[in-house]
Amino acid sequence: MRRRTGQPIELTPGAGDLPAQLFLAKAMNGAKTEAKRSTINWMDVLWLAFLAGLALLPPIEETHKQEILLGFGVIQLAEGWLVARWPSRGPICVVLWKIALATILVDHTGEVAINSYYYPIYFLPILTAAEYFGPWATLFWTSLSSAAYCSYLYPALQDFEITAEDYGRLAIRILFFYLAAMVVNRFVVENRRQTQRYQELAETLAVTNRQLEQAQAEARRSERLAALGQLSAGLAHEIRNPLGVIKGSAEMLSQKLGQSDPLATELAGYISSETNRLSGLVTRFLDFARPLHAELSPQAITVVLDRALSDVATLWKGATVQVEKHYQPDLPLVELDESLCEQAFLNLIKNAYDAMSANGGRLQVRVAKSEAGERQGVEVRIEDTGPGIPRELREQIFNPFVTTKKDGVGLGLSIVSKIIDGHHGSMRVEDASQGDGKQGTGACFVVFFPAAEGSKPVAEPAHAVIS
Ligand SMILES: Nc1ncnc2c1ncn2[C@@H]1O[C@H](COP(=O)(O)OP(=O)(O)O)[C@@H](O)[C@H]1O
Ligand SMILES: [Mg+2]
């Protein structure tokens, strides 16, 4: 650059006039998280040391320069607080202030502002922007800083003649601004992405941990229940023998007494009937506690279902229950243990009848092809018009000894779920739906049985029977 009067002045070459550490320190600081910035840390102290170093370099006498450096120090210390307080506006304010201070500093440190040795001070706002913003915003702030610096071209042009070489040097400085901004921004963005990835990973781990704890708790509960079941099964077995003796004795007593002592005969009758009840309970409990040995063979499920339906209907003594059967044609065969499966259906159908015992009702039994996940199979829906099952009870009713009936034992559904497990099937309970799709009041038990491997559909006509 040449003074129009003729004295040659050169644009200061290179970007290394400020200590290189300033640049690096800013870049490293960019990797710190925003959370860390809310307190004064050793990085801030380092910054102040750099600014103090700049203050000791010429021009020392220039008080404005020292004041501006002080301003930088204040902004640097307040930056963390500002950004923590106003996460969206804080960084904008900080960058704007730094651009303004850098522009004034350049003006006060060179005879010709654009020629100032302090022009790398623009790295401060540029790297701050790279630290807080995304790539586009960083480009914007870098352009603004470059424009602020280039604005000193105008006064320079008044007094000097600027050569193509000078323009080239200026362009190199500006390009270095962009280079530094993009490198640091890439580093910061990558760092942010990594942090987010670690956070997501930590959240996933926390969820897995919770699931593991839950599974462990369930396993402990199952172990306790299994131990309790074994103990109770042993006890029930031992109770059965004396019960047999008591029952036999009561019957003999009743025969011996005949009509001679009606009161004693009546009491002996009570002993006998109550012993029968106890014995029945113990037998059912033993059925539940005993390990299940299902002997599976491919069979038509509707045959077993029909048998269970007619068994319950024959023994039923309550109000009238209308039974509707809807069986889909061409159902595949199912791997079944006939007697266990019949027992499961008996329990479900008996429960449905019990639920409608007061006023009678309609029992709908539907069998259709179905899928559970990848498995093909058959779905049996047993739906009644009784009072239904409250939602809060729906999980519990499958636990042993949960009953709402006066004379119930609460083992029926636990036996059913054990049998279904033994058939590799699944069971759920839903609200009954009326024929028109609206929700009904009753309960609907849905049982899924997987189809037998390679089973051909049973050629059986569809039927909707009402009995
Ligand atoms: N179809 C149904 N409608 C309404 N409630 C039902 C039905 N099936 C089962 N329940 C409820 O589930 C409870 C448990 O049934 P279960 O295990 O068979 O034992 P129990 O029949 O001895 O009570 C029943 O007491 C009843 O409250
Ligand atoms: Mg029952």
Image (spheres, grey):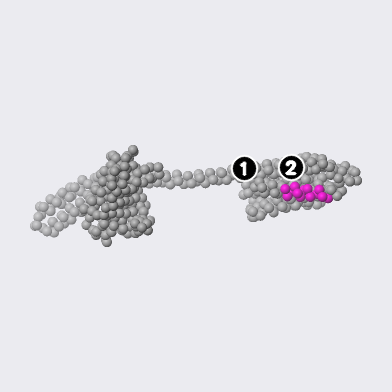
Discs 1/2, front = 2
Q: Is residue 316 above or below residue 334?
A: below
Most common SS among magenta residues:
helix
Q: Residue at x 29, y 48 (%)?
A: 462
Ligand 1 is within 8 Å of the C-beta of the residue at disc 1: no
**Horizontal and vertical percent for residue 107?**
81, 50
Position of the N terminus, as image quadrant, is top right
Q: Which residue is mark 1?
A: 190
Residue 44 in sight here: no
For numbered disc 2, what is the local secondary structure?
A: helix
Q: Determine the CA span between mark 1 and mark 2.
A: 22 Å
**Horizontal and vertical percent for residue 329?**
31, 46
The disc, 1 or 2, on the residue closer to the chain's N-terminal end is 2
Q: Is residue 180 left or right of residue 227?
A: right
In this view, the residue in front, 189 or 124, is 189
Position of the C terminus, as image quadrant, is bottom left
Q: Is residue 2 magenta?
A: no
